[in-house]
Amino acid sequence: METAILQDLGLTNAEIKIYIALLELGVATAGPIIDRTRLQNSVVHMTLHKLGDKGFVTFVKKGKIKHYHATDPQNILKFIEDKKTRFKEILPVLLAKQDKREEPEAEVFEGFKGFKNLLREGLEEAKSGDEFLFFSFYTKPIDKYPEVYNFLKEYEGERFEKGIKIKGLAPSDLKPMLATRFKSDIKYVDFPVPINISIINDRVMFFPWQYEPVSFLIKSKALAESLTKYFNLVWKEKN
């Protein structure tokens, strides 16, 4: 007889042997159970007590002797349901402890149209009061993509209109060009900082256009928080 399912329910080998023996014996004292299962006397008595606690065995006393009887196997279904009910009670606690690791998402946007779509998607998901942080768009030569700078000026107005807070960091040598084009709060630094990166909420956008006009989006709360922390550290140092 295949008894693995009973093991899966949490019964020990001794409990399974004794329960099956009692089903076959009908009603029995400890002696016949010991003879049939060939288990030690102490093991049989301890196991009968455990089976009684689980509802698998009952007994009646005749004088000082206990006569044991296996409960209907249909009761095993009730045993399973009881376990299910008890598990449901602790499920919310287990879910609260679960390590909900995010699965980052990545997308590629090609060309100038893809660049615009990427930025506008981020704006659509944002709400008033959100921060848009950027490490300045920059390519060599600076005027290689004039359509990008024209769009960024238009995009700046859309962000202001929606109530987005805009802060940027840029190399000092870009100040003559950026300061005359944009109204955003930009701080200029004389040391190396990343370029062509923007962050809004959990969206990190990369624009490595110095190679080719391809943009990248990574949706990652951890990455966005890490870059935001670095941005704010540099921003504070420039006060």
Image (spheres, rainbow, N blue to C red):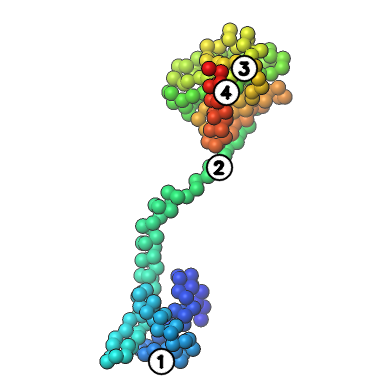
> Alpha-carbon distance for marks 2 and 3?
34 Å
- Whichever of callouts 3 and 1 sits on the residue coming sooner in the sequence is 1
Asked where in the image residue 50 lies, by quadrant, the reply is bottom left
> Alpha-carbon distance for marks 1 and 2?
60 Å
Q: Nearer the viewer, mark 4 or mark 1?
A: 4
Element under label 3? strand
Q: Amino acid at mark 3?
A: Val
| Horizontal relation, residue 9 to residue 120: left or right | left
The residue indicated by pointer 2 is: 103
Q: Nearer the viewer, mark 2 or mark 3?
A: 3
| Horizontal relation, residue 13 to residue 181: left or right | left
Element under label 2? loop
Q: Amino acid at mark 4?
A: Val
> Alpha-carbon distance for marks 3 and 1?
90 Å
Q: Amino acid at mark 2?
A: Glu
Where's residue 89, x and y in %?
36, 57
Q: Is residue 23 above or below residue 128?
A: below
Q: Nearer the viewer, mark 1 or mark 2?
A: 1
Q: Amino acid at mark 1?
A: Gly
The residue indicated by pointer 4 is: 234
The residue indicated by pointer 3 is: 189
Element under label 1? helix
Where's residue 171, x and y in %?
64, 17
The residue indicated by pointer 1 is: 31
Q: Nearer the viewer, mark 4 or mark 2?
A: 4
- Residues at circles 4 and 2 in contact by the CB criterion of under 8 Å: no
- Residues at circles 3 and 4 in contact by the CB criterion of under 8 Å: yes
Where's residue 93, x and y in %?
40, 52
- Residues at circles 1 and 2 in contact by the CB criterion of under 8 Å: no
- Identified at 55% across, 42% down, the residue is 103
